[in-house]
Image (cartoon, rainbow, N blue to C red):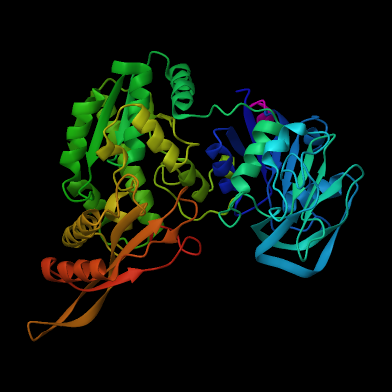
């Protein structure tokens, strides 16, 4: 890899979003802990470095610092928030606590023409190519997100102030000769509408990285990686029914053809008619060998009496592996297992290669795998975001219905059936979920191009009193959830029209036996996660 950006994570809650926004510019990047070995970071042959934000203060004991190999590289550097402060500190500038902290949306004004933010009143003398990006009179201000309690009080030698805000005299700075830049704000978040363009300018125009990270290039590179990893060995693909596992299997099949055999496990924890749809789609469109295994009783028996969400995920993870090990024996013991692990799974599970992030929950295919499993994992989507996965799926020729199906967690309805997982409760949840998806589909709120990124029902471990047919009822409650997101790292709840909510509620209560109450989850991520468990 020669066209890339290396992002160093100093503990920012937005570090993954930086990576996502850079990739939106069709530039490949990878995210590393700030103290990752130089050889590991430089293995991607970056054209420049981005230093993320973080919660520390540079003057605090033990605060993370900019590694020497980055300063010695001679490559462009962009520091964001704490990254800007760490760069200042490393180069001999001064950072101090501010009496006027900035948290929230602020207006930043560009004061000097520069390659990162654009020209104020014409092109910068040293950079005439930016003439077409002239912000013009009265157009050199833009909104952005600030989140800091420290400020730059003395810039390092060679730097000039490029922008300011009401509470930050140095909201952006740069050493144009060395291509070192720092911004106190967060260009990666949606609160900074022009942030994507700033990141593009840094990566493409300042670092000289080619913007060629497309679905086609992803497929080409992943096919090469897969072939190198598995050689001429047989490979088993774990197909769960979700888009991630489907695209992973399709990608591996493109790489190795008949060396791949797919196994679909019907756990009894799938959505309405899902098993039939998945089996049909794979046999008609993928062309790979597919074995369907019905193990509903096996999974429900293992989950009996368990209510702890982490333990439920681990039970499902181990059961999957044991079943695949059993199938592998009948297939001549393939050495490799394909999983549809994607980047958000890795981040939330705090995998070893993302050890600076707090563990949110164990994903069954990351933190829930048994240590003694007999497979080497093939995870071609491990560092892709959900929308990248869908683009790859479309480029591979998978049907739209499969690629754009509602996201579905690997553990299935296990994590949406809060409390004990039993056959009657799962049946209840499955019917309620089908009603929700049908109604949202009817009004165009789900599917390709729709506002809603994910929607589902959750069966709650509580009962409430109701009145049905002049009789008292004491039955379970269902929560419905709909979110909008571009990266599945953050998400906003999606407003469902009141008329649709009324229809959904009425249908669930009247058509699903055992449910007498419907509630609507309007919590964003964060503070919540998208799934309840």
| Residue 84, horizontal then vertical, whole percent | 77, 49
Instruction: From the viewer's perspective, tell me whether residue 523 is left or right of residue 331.
Output: right
Taking the magenta stretch, the answer to whether it contains residue 225 is no
Instruction: From the viewer's perspective, tell me whether residue 423 is left or right of residue 139.
Output: left
Which residue ends up furthest to the top in the rendered image? 232
Instruction: From the viewer's perspective, tell me whether residue 271 is left or right of residue 67.
Output: left
325 w.r.t. 459: above or below: above
Taking the magenta stretch, the answer to whether it contains residue 42 is yes
Magenta span of residues:
40-45
Q: Quadrant of the C terminus?
A: bottom left
| Residue 295, horizontal then vertical, whole percent | 19, 43
| Residue 66, horizontal then vertical, whole percent | 78, 43
| Residue 222, horizontal then vertical, whole percent | 46, 24
- The answer to whether residue 292 of the structure is visible from this angle is no
Instruction: From the viewer's perspective, tell me whether residue 443 is left or right of residue 148.
Output: left
Q: Quadrant of residue 184?
A: bottom right
284 w.r.t. 467: above or below: above
């Amino acid at each position: 890899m020669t066209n890339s950006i290396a992002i160093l994570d100093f503990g920012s809650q937005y570090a993954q979003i930086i990576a996502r926004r850079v990739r939106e510019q069709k530039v490949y990047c990878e995210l590393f802990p700030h103290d990752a070995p130089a050889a590991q970071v430089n293995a991607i042959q970056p054209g420049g470095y981005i230093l993320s934000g973080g919660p520390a203060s540079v003057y605090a004991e033990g605060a993370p610092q900019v590694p020497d190999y980055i300063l010695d590289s001679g490559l462009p550097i962009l520091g964001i928030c704490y990254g800007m402060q760490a760069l200042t500190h490393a180069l001999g500038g001064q950072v101090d606590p501010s009496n006027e902290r900035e948290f929230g949306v602020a207006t930043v004004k560009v004061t000097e023409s520069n390659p990162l933010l654009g020209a104020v009143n014409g092109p910068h003398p040293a950079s005439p190519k930016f003439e077409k990006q002239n912000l013009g009179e009265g157009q050199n201000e833009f909104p952005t997100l600030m989140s800091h309690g420290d400020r730059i009080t003395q810039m390092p030698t060679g730097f000039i102030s490029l922008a300011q805000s009401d509470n930050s005299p140095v909201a952006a700075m740069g050493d144009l000769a060395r291509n070192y830049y720092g911004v106190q704000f967060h260009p990666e978040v949606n609160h900074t509408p022009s942030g994507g363009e700033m990141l593009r300018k840094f990566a493409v125009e300042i670092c000289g990285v080619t913007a060629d990270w497309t679905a086609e290039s992803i497929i080409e590179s992943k096919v090469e990686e897969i072939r190198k990893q598995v050689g001429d060995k047989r490979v088993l693909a774990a197909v769960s029914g979700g888009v991630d596992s489907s695209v992973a299997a399709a990608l591996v099949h493109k790489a190795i053809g008949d060396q791949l055999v797919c196994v679909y496990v019907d756990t009894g924890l799938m959505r309405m008619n899902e098993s039939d749809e998945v089996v049909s789609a794979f046999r008609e469109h993928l062309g790979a060998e597919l074995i369907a295994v019905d193990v509903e009783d096996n999974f429900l028996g293992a989950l009996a009496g368990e209510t702890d969400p982490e333990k439920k995920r681990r039970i499902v993870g181990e059961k999957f592996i044991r079943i695949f090990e059993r199938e592998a024996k009948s297939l001549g013991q393939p050495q490799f297992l394909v999983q549809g692990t994607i980047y958000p799974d890795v981040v939330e599970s705090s995998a070893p290669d993302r050890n600076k992030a707090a563990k949110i929950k164990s994903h069954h295919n990351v933190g829930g795998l048994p240590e003694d499993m007999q497979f080497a994992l093939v995870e071609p989507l491990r560092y892709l975001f959900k929308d990248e996965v869908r683009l790859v799926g479309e480029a591979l020729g998978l049907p739209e219905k499969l690629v754009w199906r509602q996201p579905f967690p690997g553990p299935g309805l296990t994590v949406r059936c809060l409390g004990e997982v039993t056959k009657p409760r799962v049946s209840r949840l499955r019917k309620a979920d089908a009603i929700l998806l049908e109604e949202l589909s009817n009004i165009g709120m789900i599917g390709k191009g729709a506002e809603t990124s994910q929607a589902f029902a959750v069966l709650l471990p509580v009962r409430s009193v109701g009145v049905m047919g002049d009789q008292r009822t004491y039955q379970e409650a269902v929560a419905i959830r709909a979110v909008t997101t571009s990266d599945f790292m953050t998400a906003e709840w999606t407003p469902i029209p009141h008329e649709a909510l009324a229809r959904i509620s009425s249908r669930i209560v009247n058509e699903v036996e055992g449910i007498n109450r419907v509630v609507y989850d309007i919590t964003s991520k964060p503070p919540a996660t998208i799934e309840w468990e």
